[in-house]
Image (cartoon, helix red, strand yellow):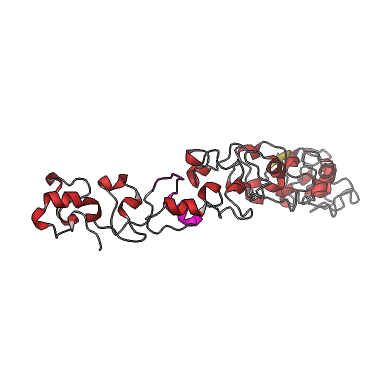
Amino acid sequence: MNQEHQGVQGYIYASAECFACHPDGTANGAFNHTTSQFPLTGNHLTLSCNQCHATGYPNTPNDCYSCHQTGYNLTNKLNHTLAGFSQNCTECHNTSGWVSTTFNHSTTTGFPLTNAHSTPVCSACHETTYTGTVSECSSCHIADYNSATNPNHLAPHFPTICSDCHTNSAWAPSTFNHDVQYFPIYSGQHRNEWNNNCLSCHTVPSNFASFSCIDCHEHNQTSMNQEHQGVANYSWNSQRCFECHPDGDSGPTLKQDHSFYPISGKHTSVTCNECHSSEGGKPQCIECHQEELTSAHKLEASNTRCWECHNTFSFDLDGLTPKKLERID
C-alpha cells in the first residue's frame, strides 16, 4: 500500500484513512482533488487518476502543456509550434473543451477582426508566424496596391496607408471622393482634362497635398494675365487660383475676402473686374452707378456714398434702407 500510494496527499496506512478515499471500495477512490493544487473542473472531472498520474503521484506537474504537448504540436488549424505560441494553454483554452478557445484577437492583439477581416482563416494574414505580424494594411494588400488601375496607385506614388481611402468592409469602392473632399476632377470643367493621371496636377509625386494649376497649357501666364486684368489680388500661382476658383469654375467664386464690402443682392451676379477697375483697389459705387446718381440726385450729385440710403437688392425708393449696408472706405 505504501508503494502504491507514494505521493498521495494525506495518505496514512490506517483503515479510517482508506475509507476516506475509498468509501465505495473502488480502486480509484474518492480523493477530494479540490484540496490539492490542481482542482478538477470541466473535462478533467471525467478522467481516471492514472491518465494524469501515469508514473505515480509524487511530483506530478500541474501545467497543461505537460499533458497536452502532443495536442499542441499536432494542431493544424493554428500551427502552435511554427507560430511560437505560448505553452501556457490557459491563455487561450479552458477545461470545458480543447477546441474551445477564449482568445480575443481585438483585446489581445489590438487589431479587431471586423467586416471582411472576420471571415479569412488565420493563415491568410499569418502565413509563417503569429508573433510580430505587421498590422499595416499594405503588408497584406500590396498586390492590390500594385495592380490598381482606377486610379493607378504605383506610378504616382500613392501613400501605402490604405485606411486613408479604404475600409475593411471591402477593397472597393474606396471612401475617397476627390470631387467632394478636394477639387472636382470627375465633373465640372476639369472632367477628362487631366489624362486620368494624378501627376497632371500633383507634380510632386511624394506629396499629394501639393498641386499645380498653372502647368496646363490653357493656364499659361500670358493668357491668364490678360483674362484677369482688373481682378483684385490676382497672381499667377496655383494657390491663388484655388483660392478664387475652389470648384474649378472659370467664373469668380467670391471666396476672396469681402468683409469690407459684403457681396450680396444683385452684386452676386457681377464679375470681379466689373467693380475692380484696378488691381487691389476698393471700388466706389459711382463707378458703376453714375447714371442712377445723375438722374435721381441732380441736386446732390456730390454725395456718392450710396450705401447710406440704398442696399444691394434695389436702387428703387422701395429699397431705401439707410445705412443698411456698411463698408470701410
- Return the residue found at the far left: 299
Q: Is residue 287 above or below residue 190?
A: below
Task: Tell me the residue at 84%/46% (across/down).
Answer: 69
Q: Nearer the viewer, residue 148 or 204?
A: 204
x, y percent for residue 140: 71, 44
As drawn, is 7 to the left or to the right of 296?
right
State whether residue 94 is above or below residue 240.
Answer: above
Q: Is residue 195 left or right of residue 235?
A: right
Give the percent coordinates (x, y) of residue 123.
76, 41
Residue 29 in sight here: yes
Q: Quadrant of residue 308?
A: bottom left
How far from the left and from the top, in percent, is residue 27? 84, 40
Quarter of the image containing the C terminus?
Answer: bottom left
How many badges with numbers are in the image? 0
Question: Residue shown at 42%/57% (left/top)?
Answer: 234
Q: Position of residue 124 (x, y in %)?
A: 74, 40
Q: Which region is colored magenta?
A: 237-251
Q: Is residue 242 magenta?
A: yes
Q: Residue at x 77, y 50 (%)?
A: 85
Q: Nearer the viewer, residue 317 or 285?
A: 285
